[in-house]
Image (tube, helix red, strand yellow):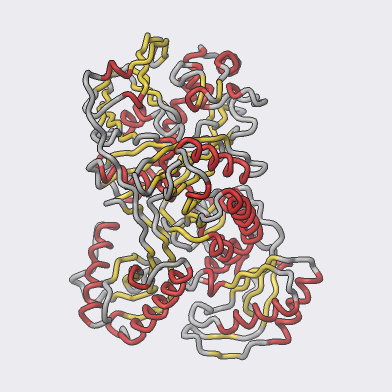
Amino acid sequence: MGEGRTIRIGIDTGGTFTDVVALDEGTGEMVTTKTPSTPHDPAEGFLTGVAKVLDLIGADGEQVSAVCHGTTVATNLLLTDDIGTLGFITTEGYEHILEIARQSVPDGYGNSYFWVKPPRIVPAHRVWTVGGRLDHTGAELRPFDEHGAVEAAHALRRAGIDTVGVCFLHSYASDAHERRMRDVLAREHPAAVVSISSEVLREYREYERSVTTLVDASVKPRVARYVAGIGARLSRVAPHASFSVMKSNGGMLSAEEVARQPITTVLSGPAAGALGAGLIAQHAGFDRVLTLDGGGTSTDVSVVVAGRPTLTTEGSIGRYPSKIPMVDVVTVGAGGGSVAWVSPEGSLKVGPRSAGADPGPLCYGGGGTEVTVTDAHLALGRIPPHLLGGEIPLDSDAARKGVTTLAVELGLTVEEAARGVLEISAWNQANAIRQVTVKRGLDVRDFAVATFGGSGSLLLCRLVDILGLPVVLVPRDPGNTSAFGLLTVDVRNDYVQTAVARHDNLDPVRVTTGYAAMEDQAAAALDREGFARADHRYLRSADLRYTGQAFEVRVDAPGGEVTAEFAAAVVALFHDEHERLYGYSYRDQPRHGVEWVNLRVSGVGPITRPVLPVLSQRDGGAERAMSGRRQVCFDKWVDTPVYWRPDLAPGDVIEGPAIIEEYGSTVPLHPGFGATVDPYGNLLVRR
């Protein structure tokens, strides 16, 4: 083993597999592997992956400098409504804020008479109020009711409620009352885990801030236990490694900080995938790319422009709105483990339910009893009779038997039933792509699509036909792109301060003070992460709207002194962005005033990104990579060549029908399609 080596490891834990990438920072050597996830104890699959990848790269735990992790713990708790028993403390007179919520009705107002609001995250009988009142500037109108706060703490303790969210009116302007409430809880109910809104989300709109705070509180105990448990076991294997976790905003955070801000990890894995695929596509010459991450349970789609994923603060996790900054990802239940089923009306459906890793598809032989997308691929010969280069054998007979039973129920042939399962899954993925493009005013034909994840590239030829895509890029080791993305991520913390003001009355001193306070917070956080002040970067932005509008548009803001020129430059960017998003602006109509709503700062601690190597060309053509032939059903059964992707080289061209296999993924190339290998080893697939 090489002396003085420095190894960085990225680990993305998914529903079915745990993906691992190790990078030797000295030589640039990178190795990838996968291991089955262990839902009963995620740490087990995590540490198995660490041991496996260290063996492959020929290093030991002493040489590991950093481990970066993408986790779905918080996401899964929210998607399954596993939030436990919560208590809520709010301002006196506002106890029904969660019940009232917003007037939005799913599927439009035509559904108003029939839609029933889902249960609130905290039922009314577990809501307590405390006297005291601030105005929108943070000035105190009524003093904090210490006696009422003590009574609320005692009531929570008597009720056995140990997880509490606190959100007082206008606490985005001043956190004084919330901090006093937290002190009372610490004194009177020391066992309670508490989240206060002024630390979770310093932004107005009380309902969203309340729910975001409660979501943070609900996942805090289990995320803290999960991170602490892995950290303790990892320290025995890799004693010198820092341990950090991917955040939803496309940044990284140390495990210690994550325990304080668990809600920031809710879209951890998908964010890493979008960043990794965006970086790979940018190197390949594609600045506008849609990323499609297909796993065992779901498919995640996002938009990346110039290597930067689109961010949003209007997201939700399950049925819970969340205003924290997150990579704008649309998720659909269309993965390799998605279950095919017949509705009561006799229609074939696929997903969103998944067989996951346990019991898994029929062909895994793990006790699964239902046909999945993976079984349909195997029954048609589109994937090999094994996964991970032979480590996991697949039972083709079990898959075909299951598809046969489904076909009989539907009155179809086996091939028609299997193709039907895949067609529905492809349309589910296509609809996810449409949600991030067509529904947001973007033309899908202006983008390349990067497909990755274990199942992300299996249906790419159908997606080209359905959506009219110009080109699809499949990275090397696509099953590990999310884990690779974890090695490309800077440390990033986001801060927001609501400061509503008309542009023509904007107070430069107030804006300067707001930005300076957040930059101080960002600096302190980056100091704790070990970054020298000279390496700190502070990115400013602002949310603006036209007077009378209910929602804002975010634009970048320059650094430096806040002057009239600064404000004018931000407003000009706002007009441009509003016109890009909605097709119009009021740039030349001064009667439509502009309002500043929120000031934002992102504190960034940059890391050294891995360098993507240019591969050497090799003699001969793609025939050198041919590993055999087998019968595959596209529209009909065809004797199809099979290629081993690691033996392909830049400039190689493959014409369909063909199957291109590698360790963690397969690309079925339909008749009429061609694939070219680019200098970085990516496959570029076109009609």
Position above or below: 430 against 601? above
Location of residue 615 with respect to 537 vertically, above or below: above
Using residue 75 as the reference point, say whether residue 617 is left or right of it.
Answer: left
Front residue of 661 and 381: 661
Q: Is residue 541 visible?
A: no
**Percent position (x, y) of residue 390?**
51, 22
Horizontal side, residue 82 vs residue 425: left or right: right
Q: Quadrant location of the C terminus?
A: top left
Extreme residue in the front direction: 3
**Residue situated in front as seen by the camera: 174 or 389:** 389
What is the total number of numbered labels drawn onto the structure image?
Answer: 0
Q: Image quadrant of residue 544? A: bottom left
Identify the residue shown where x is 29% and y is 58%: 582
User: Residue 580 appears at what percent x and percent y?
Assistant: 25, 57
Q: Is residue 586 above or below residue 507?
A: above
As drawn, 310 above or below 289: below
Measured from the top left, where is residue 131 in percent x and y? 66, 84
Q: Residue at x 51, y 54 (%)?
A: 241
Residue 280: where, in percent of width, then height?
31, 43
From the viewer's perspective, is 530 left or right of 408?
left
Q: Is residue 80 visible?
A: yes
In the displayed structure, does residue 677 sit left or right of residue 475? left
- Outermost residue on the right side: it is 158
Q: Residue at x 58, y 21 (%)?
A: 363
Residue at the spot 33% in from the left edge and 87% down from the top edge: 509
Residue sitting nearer the eye, 126 or 25: 25
